Image (tube, helix red, strand yellow):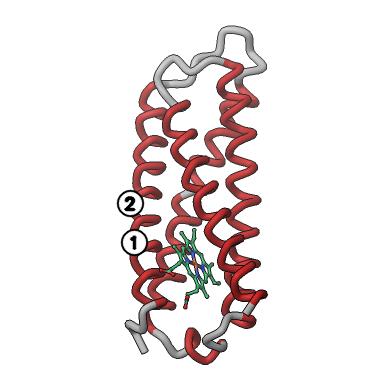
Amino acid sequence: MTTDLLLAVLHHWLVFVIAALLAAEIALLRPGIGRRQLKLLGGIDRYYGALAGAIIVVGVARVYFGLKGWEYYVYNHVFWAKMGAFLIVGLLSVPPTLRIIRWNRAAAEPDYAVPEAEIAATRRYLWLEVLVLALVIGFAAMMARGYGV
Ligand code: HEM
């Protein structure tokens, strides 16, 4: 019981923080972004990756140590829809991460300006992540309530 509760609390904390980091990235990444904000964006993006890793660890722990038992999830297709959507969020986060690294390297040049077209394209990826993350949360609530068994 306690393990299940602790893992549930931890899972929610991590999920809220990752959503906040994604929102911060969208807020920071605007045309005219300066060197300092680029550095901050790089830092946030690293935490975003680390948090995704922590969510996987805690999520897997919930599958194995949760009250319902691992069989409940492994044979539940909404659980797998959630995993698929989570994987898509991960894949969508790759191009922004690569760009952010590249921009930070280029920003060593004193008058470097990030091309506006790249900012717009990267913002589209970030917004797509928001959309698919909303699906992940929807699937999570469904599987917790017995859908997909
Ligand atoms: C960013 C990714 C994720 C988000 C946003 C997310 C979100 C959530 C939310 C909101 C709940 C609570 C559902 C409810 O009680 O109504 C939940 C439960 C759960 N999640 Fe996640 N989750 C994520 C990733 C994962 C991963 C990667 C795993 C497993 C590998 C996982 C496994 C679970 C389990 C086992 C539960 C418990 C469901 C139950 O009470 O039966 N989650 N998740």
> What amino acid is at disc 1?
Leu
Q: In this view, does 74 lie to the left or right of 77?
A: right
Q: In this view, does 108 lie to the left or right of 134?
A: right
User: Which quadrant would residue 1 be assigned to in this image?
Assistant: bottom right
- Along the line of sight, the residue nearer the viewer: 23 or 6: 6
Secondary structure of residue under mark 1:
helix
Q: Mark 2 sits on what residue?
A: 131
Secondary structure of residue under mark 2:
helix
Label 2, residues with CA under 10 Å away: few <14, some 14-19, many ≥20: few
Q: Is there a contact, CB below 8 Å, between mark 2 and mark 1?
A: yes
Q: Mark 1 sits on what residue?
A: 135
> What amino acid is at disc 2?
Leu
Tell me the residue at 34%/39% (across/down): 124
Residue 135 percent across, percent down from the top left: 34, 61
Tell me the residue at 61%/33% (across/down): 42
- Along the line of sight, the residue nearer the viewer: 88 or 116: 88
- Along the line of sight, the residue nearer the viewer: 145 or 136: 145
Tell me the residue at 48%/18% (across/down): 33
Residue 62 percent across, percent down from the top left: 59, 75
